[in-house]
Image (cartoon, rainbow, N blue to C red):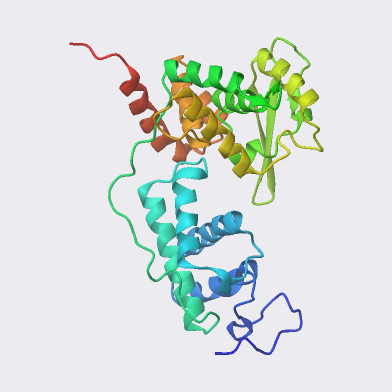
């Protein structure tokens, strides 16, 4: 099969499936895929769900990712990210549908000869309930903070591990949100109640939520800003580097599981529940929809129960 096709008038916008090839960017396939779904008699609900799933794939690998560069390994990495690294609960039902989206999408691309083989064909569908996540107990939280506080950067105490750890523990922000935080997002108008504003965009609609911060964390941030020369955002490194920081903290603290953004986010939810905070408050703080909160609340309640002392 050849990649040489007659191109449409606007190079980046294929007009028909004949214009698709291995170099076509993911974002430029969506409209034609939607047209295919409608011709197959799929409902508007299915079309919206499949489109949303492809947007998640674009969030993971980049909307300009060439369709011919997808491999089965890459798709499995995407599914792992959905379950364990995205920071948003992924129910069994949602996971199953997203696997179906991948299979339908790449089968279609292969059927119109846009790609030489179907990388989603051997992606396995999973069954059964998702495993319960892990939340740090109070002793592990203290051990992690002490371990982070003792980490060094050369001859100096490194402020980044504690800053990162306490930020996620206290606010429950997602990894993607943490990467966009700017020092200016911290409102210090009331020094006894500083507030972090998280801004994000959902389908071209800008939203924000405000989360209380510990004044001690703000003082730690000031020390961090002196130690690190920042260009714009609070963390001037990759998300993967921050993951390594948390893993190092977890190992130093003797945490039995790999310390991650997801684990700290669950820990934040459990701590707030234990403190008796209102469900609506916790849901808003975590930035979850009412639908996502149903499963998250149930799991967080279960994690809280597991931490309660057993009575004979």
Q: Can you say whether 195 is above or below 74 in the image?
A: above
Which residue sits furthest left? 312
Q: Nearer the viewer, residue 18 or 260?
A: 260
- Image location (x, y in percent) of residue 60: 57, 54
Q: Residue at x 52, y 84 (%)?
A: 113
- Image location (x, y in percent) of residue 251: 48, 29
Q: Residue at x 33, y 27 (%)?
A: 302
Residue 210, can we see it? yes
- Image location (x, y in percent) of residue 43: 45, 66
Q: Residue at x 58, y 26 (%)?
A: 165
Q: The C terminus appears in which quarter of the rendering? A: top left
Q: The N terminus appears in which quarter of the rendering? A: bottom right
Q: Can you say whether 69 is above or below 280 in the image?
A: below
- Image location (x, y in percent) of residue 269: 47, 26
Q: Nearer the viewer, residue 256 or 216?
A: 256
Q: Residue at x 30, y 45 (%)?
A: 129
Q: Quadrant of residue 69?
A: bottom right
Is residue 32 shown left or right of residue 98?
right
Is residue 112 shown left or right of residue 185?
left
Residue 279, can we see it? no
């Amino acid at each position: 099969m050849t990649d040489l096709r007659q191109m449409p008038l606007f190079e980046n916008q294929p007009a028909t499936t004949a214009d698709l090839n291995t170099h076509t960017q993911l974002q430029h396939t969506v409209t034609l895929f939607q047209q295919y779904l409608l011709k197959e008699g799929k409902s508007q609900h299915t079309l919206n769900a499949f489109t949303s799933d492809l947007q998640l794939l674009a969030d993971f690998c980049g909307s300009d990712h060439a369709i011919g560069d997808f491999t089965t390994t890459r798709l499995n990495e995407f599914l792992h990210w959905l379950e364990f690294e995205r920071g948003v609960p992924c129910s069994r039902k949602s996971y199953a549908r997203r696997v179906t989206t991948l299979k339908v999408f790449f089968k279609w691309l292969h059927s119109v000869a846009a790609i030489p083989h179907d990388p989603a064909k051997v992606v396995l569908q999973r069954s059964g309930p998702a495993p319960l996540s892990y939340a740090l107990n109070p002793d592990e939280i203290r051990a992690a903070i002490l371990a982070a506080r003792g980490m060094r950067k050369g001859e100096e105490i490194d402020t980044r591990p504690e800053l990162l750890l306490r930020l996620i523990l206290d606010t429950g922000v997602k990894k993607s949100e943490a990467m966009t935080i700017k020092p200016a997002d911290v409102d210090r108008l009331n020094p006894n109640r500083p507030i972090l504003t998280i801004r994000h965009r959902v389908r071209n609609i800008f939203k924000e939520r405000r989360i209380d911060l510990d004044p001690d964390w703000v003082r730690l941030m000031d020390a961090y800003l002196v130690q690190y020369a920042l260009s714009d955002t609070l963390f001037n490194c990759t998300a993967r580097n921050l993951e390594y920081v948390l893993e190092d903290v977890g190992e130093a603290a003797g945490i039995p599981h790999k310390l991650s953004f997801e684990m700290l986010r669950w820990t934040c939810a459990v701590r707030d529940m234990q403190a008796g905070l209102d469900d609506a408050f916790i849901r808003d703080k975590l930035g979850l929809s009412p639908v996502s909160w149903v499963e998250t609340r149930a799991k967080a309640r279960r994690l809280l129960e597991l931490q309660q002392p057993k009575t004979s």
